[in-house]
Structures are given as C-alpha cells and as structure tokens.
Amino acid sequence: MTLQCSCYCDESPQFYCERTVTARKAHVCEECGEQIQPDERYITGSGKFDGAFFTRKVCLQCEQLGQNFGCYCLGALYDEILEWGLEAGSDLPPELFDGLSAAGAAKLERLVLNKLEATCF
C-alpha cells in the first residue's frame, strides 16, 4: 500500500534499471545516510533523468519504506516524510510500516524524530 502521491515531479526518467545485489564492500545508503555493510543486500540503480545520468545505492529498509510512501525525490525520502507529517499534523501513518522489519521501523522513527528535532530547535 502506498500513500496518496502529491508529487510535483511530472517527468519520469528517460530510463532506469535497478537490481538487488550483495555488498562486497561498504557503501552509504543515499536515503538514510547509514552504512551498507559488506554481505548486506541492497538496491543499486542507474538511469538518466532530465539529461543527466545518475546512480543510486539504497538499503533494503529504505527501499521498502520508499515503496510504502510512494512518490518522492531520490535522496530526500525522510525529508519528504517529515514534511508530509508536519503538513498533515499527525503521527506517522501505519501504512509506512507495512513490510518493514522491526529494525526498519525503529530506523524510520529514529530518523524522522532526529529530523523533526533538528527542524524545531
């Protein structure tokens, strides 16, 4: 289940390909900023958007969260969740937690709370 999209992006990539791989070395997740450890599975993708090529690496927890949230700008998932929550004036919707492991749910709460504290103080 995804939340209703209120995205301002009206373009799609000219092309995009992604796959799930196992890390041979450490990488950084482009959504949460945490380290993807060797032997951990993650999503790697590449494509072309607005004339520019891009690549991305995302941990599986953030990938699942992004699918639950719906449309968002790459690299800004937690910022957009926080913005959505502030506009809605409510707690995080239960749909965001669908399919997340306990660690993924804890990461979501921790990162959104950290961003909220940084925004308010």
Image (spheres, rainbow, N blue to C red):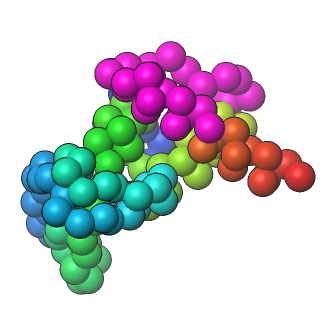
Relative to 8, 20 lies left or right? left
Residue ranking furthest to the right: 121
Does 25 appear above or below 83?
below
Front-most of 41 and 45? 41
Locate the N terminus by quadrant.
Answer: top left
Is 71 a magenta residue?
no
Residue at 60% over, 44% down: 111
Please state the total of marks drawn on the protein image.
Answer: 0
With 53 as the anchor, is 89 left or right in this view? Answer: right
- Pinpoint residue 94: horizontal percent, then vertical percent: 50, 16
Q: Residue at x 60, y 25 (%)?
A: 92
In this view, 114 is above or below 46: above
Q: Which residues are magenta?
A: 87-110
Q: Is residue 113 left or right of residue 46?
A: right
* Overall secondary structure of the magenta section: helix
The quarter holding residue 91 reads top right
Up-down relation of residue 106 to residue 112 (above or below): above
Percent position of residue 15, x then y: 12, 66
Tell me residue 120's x, y (percent).
Answer: 85, 48
> Is 62 left, or right, of 91 in this rendering?
left
Q: Quadrant of residue 3?
A: top left
The answer to which quarter of the image holds residue 99 is top left
Nearer the observer, 104 or 74: 104
Q: In this orientation, does residue 8 appear?
A: no
Asked if the stretch drawn in magenta spans residue 92, the answer is yes
Q: Residue furthest top?
A: 94
Q: Is residue 107 visible?
A: yes
Query: Residue at (32%, 65%) from the top-left corner?
Result: 27
Q: Residue 93 placed where, x, y %? A: 55, 21
